[in-house]
Image (cartoon, grey):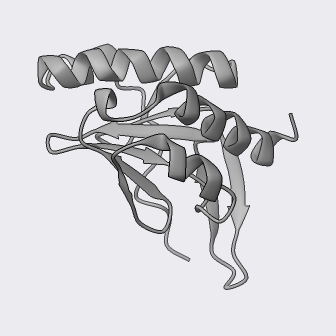
Amino acid sequence: MAENKTQPTTAGVADFLAGVAPRRQAEAETLIAMMRDISGFEPVLWGPSIIGFGTTHYRYDSGREGDMPILAFSPRKARLTIYFDGFDHYGEQLARLGKHSSSVSCLYVNKLDDIDLAVLREMLVACHGRYTGK
């Protein structure tokens, strides 16, 4: 079975952030503080552009398995991508979150000022709890 492309690296998160736009740097620092507080883990760069906190192992019914961060985001040029465990559990929070879009497990936000950070925190706490039982 092929190994996941996105793996934790030894690259520095600060070095990575130095290469993104100043607004994204500031937003990333806000998300890093929030995710560090929720998870209790320090940020690790996964692949070239995902900042993750903690690690969990997954196994799909298909047999595919691997490791992924418990909480993670990527400060992409066009918008922030915040990774979740799907959105079946977040209907009420998504209605209160503010301007966003989503796909199967990615929440897309143009800028943090567009959303309610307290609602995002609720969602991240719930996501963390589903993986850790905390």
- Quadrant into which the N terminus falls: bottom right
Task: Return the x and y of residue 40 as percentages of the image width and height.
Answer: 69, 18
Say above or below: 118 vs 75: above
Residue at position x 62%, y 37% from top?
A: 124
Q: Is residue 53 left or right of residue 103?
A: right
Task: Return the x and y of residue 102 as percentages of the image width and height.
Answer: 40, 60
Nearest the eye: 112 or 64: 112
Task: Return the x and y of residue 25 as percentages of the image width and height.
Answer: 24, 19
Residue at position x 63%, y 53% from top?
A: 92
Q: Is residue 59 left or right of residue 114?
A: right
Nearest the eye: 44 or 91: 91
Residue reaching furthest front? Answer: 96
Q: Residue 102: tell me if it is visible.
A: yes
Residue at position x 33%, y 46% from top?
A: 99
Q: Is residue 5 left or right of residue 83?
A: left
Residue at position x 48%, y 68% from top?
A: 104
Q: How many marks?
A: 0
Nearest the eye: 10 or 125: 125
Task: Return the x and y of residue 37 as percentages of the image width and height.
Answer: 63, 15
- Quadrant into which the C terminus falls: top right
Residue reaching furthest right? Answer: 133
Q: Quadrant of residue 23?
A: top left
